Amino acid sequence: MKIITVTEINEAANCLKNGGLVAFPTETVYGLGANALNPIAVAKIFEAKQRPTFDPLIVHISDLDQLNDLFERPIEPLVFELARHFMPGPLTIVHRKSGIVPDLVTSGMENVAVRMPSHPIANKLIKLAGVPIAAPSANKFGQLSPTSYKHVAKQKMKIDYLLAGDDIDSLVGIESTVVLVENNLCTILRPGIITLEDIKKAMPDAKVEIAEHNHKINSPGLLDSHYSPLKPLYFLDKGTETFPPNSGIILHSKNDKTFPAQKIIYTSETGDLIEIAASLFTSLHQMEDDITVNQIYIEKVKEKGIGISIMDRLKKACFQYQ
Ligand code: TXA
Ligand code: MG
């Protein structure tokens, strides 16, 4: 088993200081990082991912104090309230940016997205680099998000350093919840493991809502098609009895009826939504990598709580094949 050493984290941090690109683990998915304050380094991210520059990046920090540098003052109290409850962790706050944030990071928008990962290796790396780190998920634009270094390696992007370890796979498995704070209102732009209900429970006096679909102008990364495997992916119609040859089926509970298929993967034994989220991208990568599978069918989940976040990813992953 490969374990990431302190020497490797140091090498990766030096690489970031020198304007290089580093792929690193976080508790959600692998990130592809560069010094957020160096526009030339940030430009390499867009190039490596073949990502359109209208899609802004999340800036990763290792200390809550950095919120004061990245957001324009005065910062709304809701920002600090969210930070107190959910940072470090799988939550990203979008708020008006300060002058130190390059326009390339925010795609020219007035707001910047900031997140503090709880993953110890991510935290150490950002601390050692000594600067905030801009990082999208470490996959080519539109493709599946990586939950292991092997998923990063197979994308064959131009990266200067890959922090590879077998013991540090992403535990959450889907990307962070993105929350816009504006005019004393929290708007969830991208659902994640931290749900609307979680935020309301932690902050009963705060106004919190989920963005309307047309809100995507505020978050240009929220395209209809995203996170797609390189093979056709369809929702499983539970009435179907026969499938084309070489079909792979992803189910979320062993209590469900089984289907005749070449390959079946279960994301959870019992339909537990946290487990399903944690294995969602991993199961899709397994199907993508299996040369005996030509097309993939995946079961839906109920759109409630974390189920909303799981279905958000799946609808986008299936979109181009509908
Ligand atoms: O969990 C995560 O968030 C992972 C890890 C690596 O931290 N990162 C990630 O980054 O998922 P990415 O680039 O794949 O997704 C960033 C999302 C996009 O939907 C983008 O539109 C939104 O955050 N976003 C970034 N900056 C924004 C801004 N200034 N205003 C609104 N939305 C923004
Ligand atoms: Mg992404």
Image (spheres, rainbow, N blue to C red):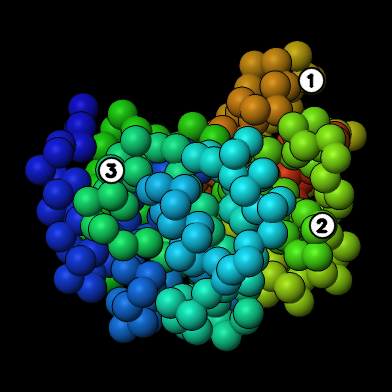
220 left or right, relative to 23:
right
Kind of residue at badge 3: Lys
Of 206 and 246, which appears nearest the observer?
206
Camera-near label (2 vs 3) is 2
Ligand 1 within 8 angstroms of badge 2 C-beta: no
Kind of residue at badge 2: Leu
Of 77 and 104, which appears nearest the observer?
77
Give the Cα distance between marks 2 and 1. Answer: 44 Å
Camera-near label (2 vs 1) is 2
User: According to the image, label 2 marks what residue?
Assistant: 185
Residue 150 coordinates in the image, percent (x, y): 33, 46
For mark 3, give the secondary structure.
Answer: helix
The answer to whether residue 93 shows anywhere in this view is: yes
Could you say which disc has been placed on residue 257 in the image?
A: 1
- Judge whether 238 appears above or below 178 on screen: above
User: According to the image, label 3 marks what residue?
Assistant: 124
Which badge, 2 or 3, is on the more N-terminal residue? 3
For mark 1, give the secondary structure.
Answer: loop
For mark 2, give the secondary structure.
Answer: strand
Which badge, 2 or 1, is on the more N-terminal residue? 2
Residue 123 coordinates in the image, percent (x, y): 34, 43
Of 159 and 268, which appears nearest the observer?
159
